[in-house]
Amino acid sequence: MRARELSLADRLAALREAVGVAEGRLEVPEVGAARSLLAKAGAREALGDATVVALAGATGSGKSTLFNALSGAEVSTPGVRRPTTGVAHATIWGEEGADRLLDWLEVPRRHRVADGDPALDGLVLLDLPDHDSVRLENRLEVDRLVQLVDVLVWVLDPQKYADDAVHTRYLAPLAGHAGVLLVVLNQVDRLDEAAAVACLTDLRRLLDEEGLAGTPVLPTAARTGLGLPELRAELARRVGARKAATDRLTADARAAAGALAVHCATDAGRDRGPDRAAREHLAGALADAAGVPSVVAAVERSARRNGNTHTGWPVVRWTSKLRADPLDRLHLGDERSRTSLPQAGAVQRAGMDAALRRARDEAGRGLPPAWRDELRRTAEDTEDRLPDRLDRAVAGTDLGPDRTPIWQRAVGGLQWLLVLTALVGALWLLALVGLGLLQLDDVVPLPRVQGIPLPTLLLVGGLLAGLLLALLCRPLVAAGARRRARTARRRLTARVAEVADEEVLAPLSEARADHDRYCAAVGRARS
């Protein structure tokens, strides 16, 4: 069962949606043409349902004579004496509101038919300037009015009915307007019957080849009146239907949608976008450009420094205080201020540019050139603000808890206990030295362990044990620093990936979504 045809209002609404989506995205002439059509449709619908029929043709085709014959008076002067100002003439049948319509069409020369055929009430017939006039303004006036009238009657003559200029410039582009186009072969009275049939047959063939199979062809002779009743009846039929303006706007809307459809992807290209590999490559390149490796290295060095400070030999531990914390020098932790990370080098910038191009190319795969150009502009806009956005993202990333592990605190306590042990041994030895000077060293007994004086054992054992403990803890501190660095890298990469999604992939996806909305609207307007 055939689907219900879309109404003109719905078709224009779909076209308006397509133009709205394309606004600011597609820099193509088809969007401007569709916008002009929407303006024309709004104006034409407000000017009533009169039927505007235009007679167009070349010099010598008898167009003006035909116009006068239909008008019942010599309104337009035929031949070389015809005015060359480039303005059209109008004849009006019984439509009181036609003046507003003619004002909109900018047709100043008007003739109203009194006591005309009631079947033609509502007809506004225009005689256009010659399309092949030597004056440019005449040709421009023809081009303008051809776009505005409801029904176009193209008047041809036996000598120039196959003129390539007429068919290429005017008739062939109206292939979608067969229902609002009428072709008249005038001056057939100059031919014998066989020649007239041959001309009509060949003209029919030409129109069929140009997609105008539904366009009627009428033979006429304006001077003798041949074919005028049939032409008048055809015009009366179209006037009586009161839908010529709607049919013309419908055909125009379809044609405009067909022109816009050139910028729609095929079905094979609709559902593509950056794949997982491209996303990961982008996140990695942006992480390198944002200085994530420098931050990760600083986190590891900072964790080593702090771990060695807590577990190191207290005798030399204070020397670590002389060096600044590598992490503090980067000024991280405040997303509102810039970090002290170095600017991305040439290699990092090249990697970021390559990743952005890959993401853009993946997003644009299968899309027409106009949308790929839009993706390129979107990517270029992103590149301008991306470095600052990445810097702020790195600055505000939580790098993980900066807590001292319990085992390091325990080792630190043990180190101080060993220092205290060595200090006791040292003080004990000093006391023994003092007693020796006073000749009292035999009074106080000196404890020994395996023959070694206990004070000496406490001093040497405390110092050596502390040094050995510090050396044994270094690998553990390094392993903990690497774990914290991996945590920091994971969090920084995830944050950079969020920026990549927000600043790069989301705009590209939005552009693809706009493409799909645009094409869906174009499809409705074109159906």
Image (cartoon, helix red, strand yellow):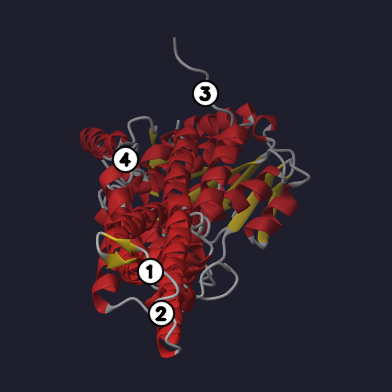
Report if residue 98 is visible in the image: yes
Callout 1 touching callout 2 (CB < 8 Å): yes
User: Which residue position is annotated with label 3?
Assistant: 5
Callout 4 touching callout 1 (CB < 8 Å): no
Q: How packed is label 3: few (under 14 Cα within 10 Å), some, or many (20 or more)?
A: few
Q: Nearer the viewer, residue 78 or 23?
A: 23
Which circle, 4 or 1, is nearer the viewer?
A: 1
C-alpha separation, residue under disc 3 versus residue under disc 4: 31 Å
Instruction: Give the quarter of the figure containing the N terminus.
Output: top left
Upstream in the sequence, badge 3 or badge 4?
3
Residue extending farthest right? 96
Provide the secondary structure element on which disc 4 rests: loop
Q: How packed is label 1: few (under 14 Cα within 10 Å), some, or many (20 or more)?
A: few
What percent of the width, then of the height, locates residue 418?
41, 64
C-alpha separation, residue under disc 2 versus residue under disc 4: 93 Å
User: Which residue position is annotated with label 1?
Assistant: 446
- The residue located at (39%, 33%) in the rendering is 215
Residue 118, by quadrant, is top right
Q: Amino acid at mark 4?
A: Arg
Upstream in the sequence, badge 3 or badge 2?
3
